[in-house]
């Protein structure tokens, strides 16, 4: 019974988070300055038609409740509604871009973990933190994602995968180095080292099991960081993914697209957080 209650609580919490995201995103987009405007108003050929469309949109979106209800109906139909900008179901715009974004994000996280884990192991093996490892990570964290991507374009070298990987690796290295430095000095590891156990054996038998919960938390942070960097990376490098689609939708106040992408990202972050804390909570139950 306790397991069922625990699962129900998690389900209700997830539903509440998604509902808050949906309402908050709708309010922010609807009442943002310029929502009821269109660049075509400046063109005499389209001004009359556009103003008629905007007047209908203003009437339709005057109350928040009906506006949100229309978006929910689109989700229930399975197409996430109709794009204001393109006039087609949102699902048709998201589906071909979802794979591009997913592959880019997974590759970047995998390479970042490999790079950050390797450098953190070498750095944490020293008695004191070395500037040789700390300065590059600090500099990478200080450079905005858009600036890093722009530098790659100007140098005609690198791409979206490199920028995302370096960004994630720098953040992950800082955390992994701190975690490993503390773990290597735990009493049971000092005892194992005194008995002649090699570094690889200690890593496999003691270090990784000891930091497993920290690694799950780090995985969640990697996903959140990667998602937050998608928009500037995909826009600057013209990657046909969700980040670029969200940017174009924001420029054109396309609420159905923005809401759908926001919900997808909220689901990813929510489930990543559930996985990172799941084992500890189930053990407590």
Image (tube, helix red, strand yellow):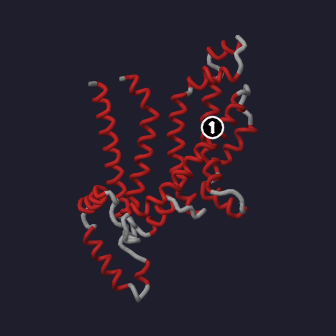
Q: Residue at x 73, y 25 (%)?
A: 127
Q: Residue at x 68, y 31 (%)?
A: 121
- Which residue is at the front of the view, 172 or 77? 77
- Which residue is at the front of the view, 115 or 56? 115
Q: Where's residue 31, x and y in %?
A: 34, 64
- The image quarter containing residue 135 is top right
Q: Where's residue 27, x and y in %?
A: 33, 59
Quarter holding the C terminus is top left
Element marked by disc 1: helix
Asked if 259 appears above or below 16 in the picture, the reply is below
Q: Where's residue 141, x and y in %?
A: 63, 47
Q: Residue furthest right?
A: 132
Q: Inspect this view and state whether residue 170 appears.
A: no
- The image quarter containing residue 129 is top right
Asked if 86 appears above or below 226 in the picture, the reply is below
Quarter holding the N terminus is top left
Q: Residue at x 53, y 55 (%)?
A: 230
């Amino acid at each position: 019974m306790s397991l069922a209650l625990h699962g129900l609580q998690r389900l209700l919490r997830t539903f509440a988070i998604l509902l808050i995201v949906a309402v908050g995103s709708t309010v922010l987009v609807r009442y943002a300055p310029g929502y009821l405007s269109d660049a075509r108003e400046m063109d005499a050929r389209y001004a009359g038609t556009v103003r008629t469309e905007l007047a209908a949109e203003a009437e339709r979106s005057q109350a928040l409740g009906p506006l949100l209800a229309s978006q929910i109906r689109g989700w229930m139909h399975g197409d996430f509604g109709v794009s204001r900008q393109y006039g087609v179901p949102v699902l048709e715009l998201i589906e071909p871009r979802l794979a591009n974004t997913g592959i880019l994000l997974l590759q970047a996280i995998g390479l970042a973990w490999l790079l950050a884990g390797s450098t953190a192991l070498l750095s944490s093996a020293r008695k004191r933190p070395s500037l040789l490892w700390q300065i590059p990570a600090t500099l990478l964290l200080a450079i905005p994602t858009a600036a890093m991507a722009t530098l790659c374009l100007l140098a005609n070298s690198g791409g979206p995968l490199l920028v995302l990987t370096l960004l994630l690796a720098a953040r992950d290295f800082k955390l992994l180095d701190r975690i490993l430095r503390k773990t290597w000095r735990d009493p049971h590891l000092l005892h194992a080292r005194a008995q002649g156990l090699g570094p690889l054996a200690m890593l496999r038998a003691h270090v990784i099991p000891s930091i497993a919960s920290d690694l799950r938390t780090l995985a969640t942070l990697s996903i959140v960081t990667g998602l937050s960097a998608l928009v500037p990376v995909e826009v600057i490098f013209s990657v046909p993914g969700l980040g670029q689609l969200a940017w174009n939708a924001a420029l054109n106040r396309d609420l159905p697209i923005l809401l759908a992408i926001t919900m997808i990202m909220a689901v990813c972050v929510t489930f990543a957080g559930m996985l990172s804390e799941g084992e500890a909570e189930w053990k407590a139950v």
